[in-house]
């Protein structure tokens, strides 16, 4: 039997506000335990929540970016359950009246096709604190610094059919929230978290089967691995005549498997009801319009523009627009007079991204300024540098060598492209190796490499390879 | 109407309350009476009536995103039954 | 005997604030053990921590706060074992404002646990006794505040009113109790019972004393999203408006079965006084008012079940010793920390919010709540004030209604509708039945505090009921 998997993702994106969603303590990551947990975050008797305007604006920004309907009236509700990292015994969230409804994200698949994934809703809520299980011998430690950090929970439709699609969607979302400057997307620090709902069904079946929810997917790789494992597991269960039970499963990245955390039987009854401490959030048209008019160019529009304006393929355009900063970097270089946008794309996607990856840097911390890279590429264009020399210059610039011309000067890396000078060197080399030259002239093509090597050695690699080749050809069959 | 013991136990579990053997029976009886009593609400015709959450129907106001509230962890943790190294402690939770 | 009002005290405080403070401290020392009105009494000097004591529009006025308002560095128990040792790190908005106005804190008054009760018998710190008859209840949940003012242990006390918790004890103790419009006074720092119903208010001898205090207490607070941003009128100045020309709707619903006939007579007498003062009376019947108690006993427990979830023995409050695991810690801390009535309401609230029951109970009650509010709003199109008895009977005996929660709940039958509708209301002394006080309730439209205070002030100008002192508690220096 052929199986089809059905995947929906729930993403929790921490919003990039200074202060928390309902209190004025800072949201900074990594502070000492409980030093950013104020009276409201701790749920002290008598405290009350007041809503952060920026968190609301960010949610609206997201909604507009995915073409959603913005809830003109949304309502905060309490989700009631007991857990030590949930100080009030309830989480303030949105339930039946979220701030963002509907919308979609177009994601680019590896084959170059675009798939539209529906987004059911996105709502504002507060984050919980953290439980630390490995610090105390008999206790769990509770750190409530994170409690009250604003979250946007983004719920997709169950429209993804493979792990690849799910990852593509997640990456698209990741790019979008960073474009919108509403989330830093740091998955390691938990500011962009993902849960997945997965089920499998015989190909052709319309109704959905029982699904499981996988938690703790804190990298794209884990999402892919966990989904692949889980789909395979479910198919195995179904094919051996078993049934899938609705449950929450945890992904164990060390063992590369998912395992049951709790079944639906012990699922909570969250007893949602409108939070009486908060009034309905009514958004006026002017408020929404102001946000709409300040939206940046979105990833998809930018990608399409890159393809047309710079003549790039879909893949290159996607890579170069994965963050606003990278796209800006590329555009600054590619916009320089006389540079070939395709050559620029190759260098940015090749040397620059490789260097960033190797040195664990973000594009914002790239050691070579866009104008300096443009300067280097101009030296290839004007024949001063060979591709190989340019890479050497690039490495020197990367490690703080200054601009391209300074490095070229300091290292004497100017390409020898003066015909007369190069001919003189070639003649010296031929004179030193008469036997080989005769063989070469007699038709032993392999010896070309030998002479190129000899000349390069003599010129300390500065000979223009193209000119050298031309001259050697010319001398092999002199015009009679 | 009477609330069966397992219903009381389920409610107690949701509310994190401990209801002992003898209390369960009495509470089941009392709760059932209260719940019967409030069913008088059924006499009202409420079709097309919107639920009222707040007496005054106003909108939420927004505060600006500024850091302000001071955090005095040591002072706050004096209120707590058990803390260590800045953490609030609870019996070990196994995940 | 003539108990001193706030204006007189303020005048006196200008020259000898310590004498006034000492007078009340002395009375607390002498009488509190009889009525158990205070949970915590501040020692000499302790109250001086208040930053602005002495200055301000209430400079030198001694005050007692219901132990539901958090006070920085002063134990705040909410009448519960759960918070028996809780010393808050901050001040409630009400505490802050009154301190800023110059009030000096005498102590924290006893109350039903987490404000859940109508007799003050659910307090972990023992019941309060009614100064008019020590075998009777003072009402609740602000029973300590009511008894303290009635017995002359404090000139003014704060209270909270979720279903009648200010007006009912004020009526049973023979004093003036005032609940402002929902949103008029900040709830920040007021320990929540049912957030959409809770409102801070005042218990005092007279409408005039209420007006003085309310003026300092009311106003917008950005820390409470449900507090309303609109100017605070000068309630003191507005007292002179009287009641002439006001149309008063007599709430006929309250004269149905269940009302003690003698209480009914006192209320009819009081209404005639208002008529003599120039008000016109008419009968009003609110079709859905009888559903107030059932609607309340769905909505208030629902909110309370969630509001009280924060008491889990982790960050503050009682923690049961020797817990086996986390679930055991939660259950035992909460079951040992909360009393029976609180647990009963938490369970009721959990039930009405739980899956499968939400629509039939919670949503239904919210719809009925709208009908009740609409009933009131319709009435206020033709009348200025609604009037009736505050309670069906005078103070009942301690223990008389503790066996049956429903009987206790029905004691708030006349006061609860006002909370559901969010309106301002007041109870003024209106006579005695068998030596026990009876309260007349006056209800106003949204933010019509000044109007009902003026009506009550006119009534009190024409009657002596609010000047009566419980036998044995007369304030000789007055």
Image: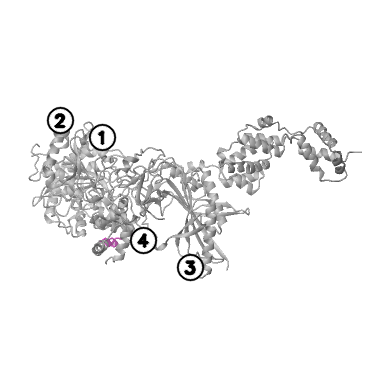
The magenta segment: B37-46
Per the picture, the main secondary structure of the magenta-coloured stretch is helix
- Quote the CA–CA distance across marks 4 and 2: 61 Å
> Quick check: C323 above or below B85?
below
Q: Residues within 10 Å of mark 4 (few under 14, many from 20)?
A: some
Give the label on residue C100, or none: 1
In which image quadrant can residue C151 be found? top left
- What chain letter is assigned to the residue under label 1? C
In which image quadrant can residue B72 be found? top left
The answer to whether residue B42 is magenta is: yes
Question: Residues at badges 3 and 2 in contact (C-beta under 8 Å)?
Answer: no
Horizontal side of C301 relative to C281 (left or right) equals right
**Label 3 sits on residue:** A243
Residue C266 x, y percent position in the rendering: 12, 51
- What chain letter is assigned to the residue under label 3? A
Q: Nearer the viewer, mark 4 or mark 3?
A: 3
- Quote the CA–CA distance across marks 4 and 3: 26 Å
- What chain letter is assigned to the residue under label 2? C
- Quote the CA–CA distance across marks 1 and 2: 19 Å
Residue C458 x, y percent position in the rendering: 16, 41
The way the protein has been coloured in the rendering is one colour
User: Looking at the rendering, in which quadrant would you find the C terminus of chain A?
Assistant: top right
- Quote the CA–CA distance across marks 3 and 2: 83 Å
Comparing A9 with C3, the one in front is A9
The answer to whether residue C247 is magenta is: no
């Amino acid at each position: 039997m052929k199986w089809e998997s059905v995947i929906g993702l729930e993403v929790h994106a921490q919003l990039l506000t200074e202060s928390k969603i309902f209190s004025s303590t800072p949201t900074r990551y990594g502070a000492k335990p409980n030093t950013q947990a104020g009276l409201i975050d701790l749920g002290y008797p008598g405290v009350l929540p007041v809503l952060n305007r920026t968190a609301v604006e960010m949610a609206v920004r997201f909604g507009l970016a995915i073409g959603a309907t913005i809830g003109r009236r949304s309502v905060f509700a309490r989700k009631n359950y007991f857990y030590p990292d949930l100080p009030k015994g309830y989480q303030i969230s949105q339930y039946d009246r979220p701030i963002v409804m509907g919308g979609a994200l177009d994601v680019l698949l590896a084959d170059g096709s675009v798939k539209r994934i529906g987004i059911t809703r996105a709502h504002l809520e507060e984050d919980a604190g953290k439980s630390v299980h490995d610090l105390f011998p008999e206790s769990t430690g509770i750190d409530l610094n994170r409690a009250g950090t604003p979250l946007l929970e983004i719920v997709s439709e169950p429209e993804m059919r493979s792990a690849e699609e799910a990852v593509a969607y997640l990456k698209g979302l990741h790019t979008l929230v960073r474009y919108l400057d509403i989330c830093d997307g740091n998955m390691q620090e938990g500011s962009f978290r993902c849960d997945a709902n997965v089920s499998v069904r015989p190909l052709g079946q319309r109704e959905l089967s029982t699904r499981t929810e996988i938690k703790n997917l804190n990298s794209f790789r884990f999402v892919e691995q966990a989904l692949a494992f889980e789909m395979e597991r479910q198919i195995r269960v179904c094919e051996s005549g078993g049934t899938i039970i609705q449950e929450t499963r945890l992904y164990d990245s060390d063992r590369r498997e998912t395992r049951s955390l709790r079944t639906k039987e012990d699922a909570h009854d969250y007893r949602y009801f409108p939070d009486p401490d908060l009034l309905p959030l009514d958004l006026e048209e002017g408020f929404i319009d102001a946000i709409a008019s300040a939206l940046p160019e979105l990833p998809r529009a930018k990608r399409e523009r890159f393809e047309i304006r710079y003549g790039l393929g879909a893949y290159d355009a996607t890579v170069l627009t994965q963050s606003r900063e990278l796209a800006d970097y590329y555009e600054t270089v590619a916009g320089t007079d006389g540079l070939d946008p395709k050559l620029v794309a190759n260098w940015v996607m090749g040397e620059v991204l490789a260097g960033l990856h190797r040195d664990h840097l973000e594009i914002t911390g790239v050691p070579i300024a866009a104008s300096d890279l443009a300067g280097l590429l101009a030296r290839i264009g004007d024949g001063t540098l060979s591709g190989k020399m340019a890479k050497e210059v690039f490495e020197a610039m990367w490690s703080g060598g200054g601009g391209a011309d300074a490095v070229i000067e300091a290292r004497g890396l100017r390409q020898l492209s003066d015909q007369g000078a190069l001919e003189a060197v070639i003649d010296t080399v031929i004179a030193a190796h008469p036997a080989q030259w005769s063989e070469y002239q007699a038709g032993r093509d392999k010896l070309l490499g030998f002479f190129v090597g000899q000349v390069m050695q003599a010129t300390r690699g500065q000979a223009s390879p193209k000119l050298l080749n031309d001259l050697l050809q010319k001398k092999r069959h002199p015009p009679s | 109407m009477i609330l069966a013991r397992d219903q009381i136990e389920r409610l107690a579990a949701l509310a994190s309350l401990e209801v002992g053997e003898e209390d369960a029976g009495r509470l089941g009886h009392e709760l059932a009476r209260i719940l019967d009593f409030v069913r008088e609400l059924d006499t009202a015709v409420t079709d097309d009536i919107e639920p009222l959450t707040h007496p005054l129907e106003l909108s939420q106001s927004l505060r600006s995103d500024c850091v302000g509230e001071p955090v005095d962890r040591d002072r706050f943790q004096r209120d707590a039954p058990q803390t260590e190294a800045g953490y609030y402690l609870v019996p070990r939770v196994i995940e | 005997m003539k108990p001193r009002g706030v204006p007189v005290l303020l005048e006196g405080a200008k020259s000898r604030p310590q004498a006034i403070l000492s007078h009340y401290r002395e009375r607390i020392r002498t009488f509190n053990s009889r009525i158990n009105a205070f949970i915590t009494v501040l020692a000499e000097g302790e109250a001086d921590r208040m930053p602005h004591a002495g200055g301000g529009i209430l400079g030198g006025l001694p005050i007692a706060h219901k132990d539901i308002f958090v006070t920085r560095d002063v134990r705040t128990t909410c009448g519960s074992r759960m918070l028996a040792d809780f010393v808050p790190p901050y001040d409630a908005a009400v505490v802050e404002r009154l301190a800023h106005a110059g009030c000096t804190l005498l102590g924290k008054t006893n109350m039903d646990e987490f404000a859940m009760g109508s007799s003050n018998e659910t307090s972990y710190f023992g019941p309060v006794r009614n100064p008019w008859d020590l075998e009777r209840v003072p009402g609740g949940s602000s029973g300590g505040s009511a008894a303290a003012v009635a017995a002359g242990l404090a000139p003014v006390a704060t209270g909270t009113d979720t279903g009648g918790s200010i007006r009912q004890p004020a009526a049973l103790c023979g004093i003036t109790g005032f609940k402002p419009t929902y949103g008029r006074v900040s709830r920040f720092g007021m320990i929540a019972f049912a957030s959409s119903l809770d409102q801070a208010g005042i218990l005092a001898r007279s409408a005039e004393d209420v007006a003085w205090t309310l003026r300092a207490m009311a106003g917008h607070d950005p820390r409470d999203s449900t507090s309303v941003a609109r100017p605070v009128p000068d309630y003191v100045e507005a007292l002179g408006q009287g009641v002439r020309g006001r149309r008063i709707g007599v709430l006929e619903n309250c004269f149905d079965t269940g009302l003690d006939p003698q209480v009914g007579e006192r209320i009819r007498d009081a209404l005639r006084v208002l008529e003599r003062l120039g008000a016109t009376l008419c009968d009003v019947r609110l079709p859905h008012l009888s559903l107030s108690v059932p609607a309340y006993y769905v909505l208030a427990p629902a909110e309370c079940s969630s509001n009280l979830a924060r008491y889990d023995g982790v960050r503050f409050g009682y923690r049961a010793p020797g817990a086996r695991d986390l679930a055991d810690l939660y259950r035992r801390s909460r079951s040992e920390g909360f009393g029976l009535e609180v647990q009963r309401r938490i369970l009721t609230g959990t039930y009405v919010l739980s899956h499968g029951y939400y629509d039939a109970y919670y949503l239904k009650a919210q719809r009925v709540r709208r009908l009740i509010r609409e009933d009131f709003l319709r009435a206020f199109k033709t009348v200025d004030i609604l009037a009736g008895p505050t309670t069906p009977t005078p103070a009942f005996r301690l223990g008389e209604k503790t066996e049956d929660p429903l009987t206790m709940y029905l004691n708030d039958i006349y006061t609860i509708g006002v909370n559901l509708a969010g309106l301002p209301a007041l109870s003024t002394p209106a006579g005695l039945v068998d030596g026990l006080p009876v309260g007349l309730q006056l209800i106003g439209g949204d933010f019509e505090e000044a109007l009902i205070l003026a009506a009550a002030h006119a009534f009190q100008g024409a009657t002596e009921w609010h000047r009566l002192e419980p036998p044995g508690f007369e304030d000789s220096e007055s």
